[in-house]
Amino acid sequence: MQIKPILAALKRHKAGTVLIALQIALTLAIVCNALIIIRQRTEHLSRPTGMIETDLLTVANRWVGVDEKATPSLGKTDLEALRGMPGVVDATYANSYPLRGGGWSTSVNITPEKKKEMAHTTLYFSDDHALATMGLKLVGGRNFRPDEIDWVDPKAFDTTPVVIVSKALADKLYPDGSALGKVLYHSGATKPSTIIGIVERLQVPWTGTWAGNFAENAILIPRLLTGNFGSYLVRTQPGQLERLTKAAPALLFKTNRMRVIPDERGVRTFAQVREQAYKSDRGMAVLMGVVCAVLLAITAAGIVGLTSFWVGQRRKQIGVRRALGATRHDILSYFLTENLLIGAGGVIVGAVLAIGMNLWLVSHFEMERLSLLYVAAGVVALLLLGQGAVLAPAMKASRVPPVEATRSV
């Protein structure tokens, strides 16, 4: 197949050629960057919390008309009642938990100087039942002892003698792996806290991109906060979660009615917590997927439409070629090659646009750099899409009989 006659024919159809090439270029640029967003969101959705998420119930509790000084005794009563329920493995009280969406964050260092933070972290106020309830895996050291747990006013909180940290934070503070038994300083405190335990993984409460740099930096504090708000986490036996979703709040109200458990997000299984936390990420991934599918469909339709139009215009020319000895395969190859040349021009421009668009997104938003593998895959996909789209009208052109050469236009 000679390329020169094909190029000469395309020059006579500049408008259609340029429009299809630009459509392919824009599709490639948008789809490549959309795939980056989809991959980011998908990785976000599947990020592990470090907890055993099955059979875990969360109950948001707000005291009403209760003196804050009375909340420790009320909380202890609630926990004893929850732990004594049939089907409950363990329960704990916490200011926050992974994916909840709110909590404490602070800087952390290994020296008392405040020149520069070594890391940023979240603080989980917890007791000696937190590890078992949340299903956290202790990879070094020990759990808190009951005598180390106390209740504290949030406004008066300073620091604690001992803490448990996530492995990610331990490795950040002590890259040589010697964090166990070492000290850290957090929340601007001048007194050190000794690391007595390290959990394999523990995610922060936030899912936003701003928390991405410290997503697995967490400190467990052996303190429970007084105040009118907190959350109960309940670990249930297998098969008991649905029953306890109704029974646990009922028991809490029976214990003390001076409380409010919100109707919305008040009682949630952790599966519901995860679903609601990543609702926007899931929506964005679906939206980008739909955009990609629509763009590819429009591009394919454009190629089919233009080629069909050209076939209609060239029926007499095709008939002449057939009369001069061109085979059906020759006609088919002509249109496939013609489309391949248009597609090649489009993907070259599209690759440049994709990289340029990505550089702009990286500089203005929290976007990853576009891998050349994505561009290469996009180029191949668009070229194959073009060849597939042109196949039907090209087959139709190859079936034009030689007698068309004798017909008037």
Image: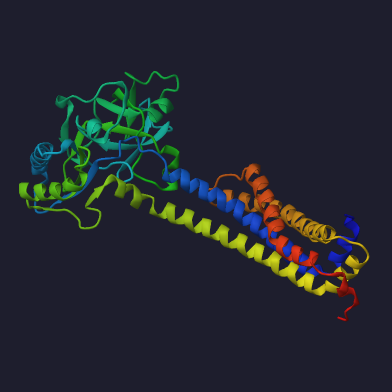
Residue drawn at x 11%, y 39% as measured from the top left: 86
Q: Quick check: 165 left or right of 247?
A: right
Q: Which residue occupies the extreme right position in the image?
A: 324
Q: Quick check: 370 left or right of 172?
A: right
Q: How many marks?
A: 0
Q: Residue 143 location, x and y as percent?
A: 24, 24
Residue drawn at x 34%, y 26% as measured from the top left: 184
Residue drawn at x 89%, y 64% as measured from the top left: 8
Examine the rendering and report whether any part of residue 366 can be seen: no
Quarter of the image where one finds residue 185:
top left
Along the line of sight, the residue nearer the viewer: 46 or 5 = 5
Q: Which residue occupies the extreme bottom position in the image?
A: 408
Along the line of sight, the residue nearer the viewer: 87 or 47 = 87
Quarter of the image where one finds residue 304:
bottom right
Q: Residue 356 location, x and y as percent?
A: 66, 52
**Snapshot colouring:** rainbow
Q: Residue 135 location, x and y as percent?
A: 27, 33
Residue drawn at x 41%, y 20% as measured from the top left: 177
Q: Quadrant of the N terminus?
A: bottom right
Along the line of sight, the residue nearer the viewer: 62 or 297 = 297
Q: Residue 407 location, x and y as percent?
A: 88, 79
Examine the rendering and report whether any part of residue 328 can be seen: yes
Q: Quadrant of the C terminus?
A: bottom right
Q: Quick check: 231 left or right of 310?
A: left
Along the line of sight, the residue nearer the viewer: 237 or 155 = 237
